[in-house]
Image: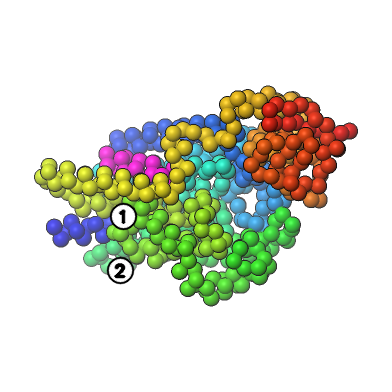
Amino acid sequence: MQLRWRELFSSKVETEARWDRWDFVALALAVFIVGWVFALKVKTFYDLGYSEDLFASLQAARSWLEGKGLLRDNWSGNVLAVHTYLLLLPLGLVAKPFGAPGLLFVLAASVGVTYFWATRMLRVLGVAGLFAVVLAAVLLASPISVFFYQEWHHGFHVEDLAPALCLLLFYFLLQRRLIPSIVTALVIISVKEDAPIAAAMVAIVAGVETWIASAGTPVRCRFNRPAAIVLLLSLAAVPLLLAISFSQPPTMYAPHSVDRIYIVKPGTLSSQGALFAFVLSNIADWLGSEVVRQWLWVMVVGSFATILLRPYYLIAGVPTTLVAWLQNQNDLLLWAPRIYSTAALLWCVTLVGFASIARGITLDKRRGQMAVLAVAVAVIALSAFDQLALVPLARNAYLLRSGSPYSPAERRQADELFARYRREGKPDEPVVASTRLFRYAQDRNLFWLNRLHDRPAPVWMLGDSSDQNPSLRISSNRIGVRSEIDPEDYTLIDHRGRFVLLRKKQ
């Protein structure tokens, strides 16, 4: 009994987890998941359910293939001044020929990778095939995981790919494979300036788990050298990525990422050193913030309480709350660009916890097995209920709702109206659109109505007179709330219900 209890708080790492039929079952399910998620994402895309960041990412990803320079878009101009989205560069090879659906497919593929590698991770941790397939599905189908990949309103951020890459890194680190670990860590670091935090968390978990799993062996055998190297690499990458961002001249629409911090005056943190000094001098405020308190609850219910088997990861994981705290926006902690580091840590800890429970509780009596199963189902149900309370919008994904604000009739009106723009408009002609209408100009020279200062006047306008965002609302007689554009300069080409199509007068 004491041995079983000890197994709950330690891992059993099998460096050789041979493939069997359950791995092929997991692979088949992963392929199915990719198709399912992609179908839902594409449906939402064509139902006009996505806007803003998906299309800014699309422009930035393909800009180097269109001769516009590295990571350029019509939202911020120079993306590197805001975020070091280096991973968008290779994604341009998909974004250029396939547009926004190409990026949505990459995201769907990462969901399949997450499931398959979660299954492989459990196998490496000594879990039997059937249990690995089921437990990986429980993790991926949890409301927080679904909400993360759902990407309500935006549809895609490059940060969405980081947790899948982190699981791949975790797998390599558990097997102590140096070169694959370093390569994967570099890919994660290329996601964004705070992505090294995610890689560092994974390295810490892998290092601790392999150290505990090797109890009784010499220190040199217990020490996970690849995990230590990845941790040092991640720590060194943060100031380097910040230096890249600080080296870019800020503009009106491309302030440095730290200038968008809402708890200090813009320009106060003008260097990496100033940022680090500010964080160190305000640690007490950070640790006592609402962000950290909410994060603790997310870690408990999000891990199905398995974090209680490894409570020390709560201490190591606090840096994953840094960006949300600096932004001073508690309600955005669960937004994908804020929580992706937490998601990576959460999934690694949950898999380790699942493996411990699967190995530690091996009861011979059927009555005992039924009792354990009942408790497990109750914990999963309670955690799922609490997760839904945190992310209620996940219900829409479970119900296969696209999240579009438009009725089917309104979408038909929009398709009929803006088909004329697709026929008559030229790809290089500047065009602006209301919030949810970017899809019609995704492969054109799309601009944002509220970011036209020192930019060319749009030739075309695709408008929604009842848009939820007043600054992007376009009607036949009014263009935006603070727009300097005169409606008299445009001709009403046609309208359908709430939608209008305008063209600049010759």
Which numbered disc covers residue 306?
Answer: 1
Q: Nearer the viewer, residue 287 or 166?
A: 287
Q: Main secondary structure of the magenta part?
A: helix
Tell me the element at label 2: helix
Q: Residue at x 60, y 25 (%)?
A: 409
Asked whether the viewer can see residue 183, the reply is: no
How many C-alpha atoms fall within 10 Å of the one at disc 1: few (<14), some, or many (≥20)? many
How many C-alpha atoms fall within 10 Å of the one at disc 2: few (<14), some, or many (≥20)? few
Side (left or right) of 339 relative to 52: left
Residue indicated by mark 2: 219
Point out the stretch of residues depicted in magenta: 130-146
Q: Quadrant of residue 193?
A: bottom right
Q: Position of residue 119 (x, y in %)?
A: 34, 43
Above or below: residue 109 compared with residue 249: above
Q: In which quadrant is the C terminus drawn?
A: top right
Side (left or right) of 328 relative to 204: right
Q: Nearer the viewer, residue 351 or 418?
A: 418
The amino acid beneath tag 1 is Thr
Q: Position of residue 353 (x, y in %)?
A: 30, 53
Q: Position of residue 448 (x, y in %)?
A: 72, 44
Above or below: residue 209 compared with residue 394: below
Spatial CA distance of label 1 from label 2 is 28 Å
Asked whether the viewer can see residue 143, the reply is: yes
